[in-house]
Amino acid sequence: MNDEKNTFPSSENCAACGCGAEGLPWSGRGTDLPIAGCRFSLYPMSDRYVDIILGALKETDTSAVWSQSDALSTVYRGRLPYVADAVKALFIHAWQDGVHMALEGQYSKGCPGDIDGDSKLGLEGDAPNAAAVRDRHFPVLCKFALYPMGTGDYIQHIANVWRAAEARGLCPETIHYATRLSGDVHDIFDFLEEVCASMDGKVSHYIVHFTINCNSPTAE
Amino acid sequence: MNDEKNTFPSSENCAACGCGAEGLPWSGRGTDLPIAGCRFSLYPMSDRYVDIILGALKETDTSAVWSQSDALSTVYRGRLPYVADAVKALFIHAWQDGVHMALEGQYSKGCPGDIDGDSKLGLEGDAPNAAAVRDRHFPVLCKFALYPMGTGDYIQHIANVWRAAEARGLCPETIHYATRLSGDVHDIFDFLEEVCASMDGKVSHYIVHFTINCNSPTAE
């Protein structure tokens, strides 16, 4: 809980983004803010999951994002490159040899009335975790789904993203309700960031849900 | 991999649902099928995660759903009450005293061109797992987000669902990009099913993403 929640006057808020939008679309301050965010949960399938998560958090520089955690997930908010940098670094720092681990998350930007957690929007410069993780590589699996909201041509945006994944060599495969990718951890995380960036100016509100895992024991 | 995927003629498919829709909305056979589905991943944070998952799968009756698994997730497809019954039963059967566990998933219905995995749509009668899990109760936390696709009034649908959660006593709280709920495991799963059912006839294509966990060590 943080006290910023108390700035919402109504008990009926937007369940897609946690914003204060009530009823029909409401163009609040947040609609025009260049603020992206990622809500995520990290799941190391190990008895040592607490130590793995806390250790990764300790190694990750979150100075360029606004952050809030609860018993289900953590959210980072700020400029997209910094949010994506922090989420990728957390996953890479949490990787342990032989430990099956998954990260589920949702990138989002543009919910009407998305109005708090914007304290880091003025930052500029290099992403703070890039140098520390640049040389760490391992293969991951990913599934993701893009949701462009409030538009009748959402399938066209989704098809464009599919083609982009193919062009990046990420082996997109159709599965029910999502697209699967596989590749190096950097290529997958960077592609998800690219998907988000590509929506800017095309739709006012989008969400990208994703799951990334490593060291899966499941043979395919 | 299953050979049904080979029925898609194009390499460019809908990344929101894995259907064969290409380019602009395509009204295929699937659009009118009364087929729902849930893609989910179960994460027991334990060294024994494989045994926990396999044990729960063994106890869950999946005879009323079409199922497919890969290294990232499993999908159940069929009539909504049977899909919801199987997902809830799997989670309840996987519960272990003191083991922190999360289930992430997405219910969906109505993607244009959602055309396979429909072999169980003719079934009727009681949900096969209901009796076995009816008397097992424990508290869970949940976050969810509803995405009504292709419509400009999506915020209105989301607001209605928020009010329904409040009416059911599930303590909805706004968080960035989602709504949090808490309650008994049956009440939470049944509410998510109710959200899906409530979209029927209102929007042609919706997705409900959710995360449910139990035995969290995080104090709030």
Image (cartoon, coloured by chain):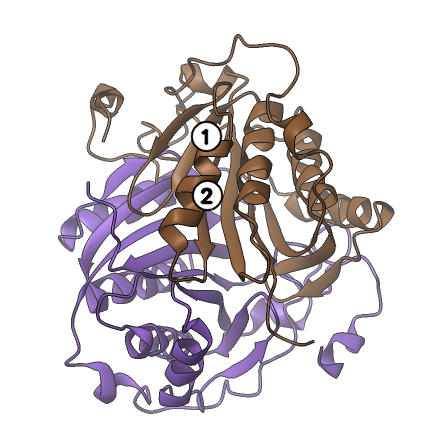
Chain colours: A brown, B purple
Quick check: B179 above or below B61? above
Q: Nearer the viewer, residue B151 or A192?
A: A192
Q: Residues within 10 Å of mark 2 (few under 14, many from 20)?
A: many
Q: Which residue is labeled 2 in the image?
A: A40
In the image, which disc is placed on residue A190?
A: none
Residue in view at x 68 percent, y 59 percent = A180
Quadrant for the N terminus of chain A in the image: top left
Instruction: Give the image location of residue B111, x and y in percent.
Output: 59, 61
- Mark 1 residue element: strand
Percent x, y of residue A144: 61, 52
Please report, as a chain letter, where disc 2 is located.
A
Q: Residue at x 71, y 41 (%)?
A: A186
In the picture of the structure, the residue carrying the numbered disc 1 is: A76
User: Mark 1, chain letter?
Assistant: A
Residue closest to the eye, B186 or B158: B186
Q: Find residue A45 and report its image quarter.
A: bottom left
Three-letter amino acid code at the position of disc 2: Phe
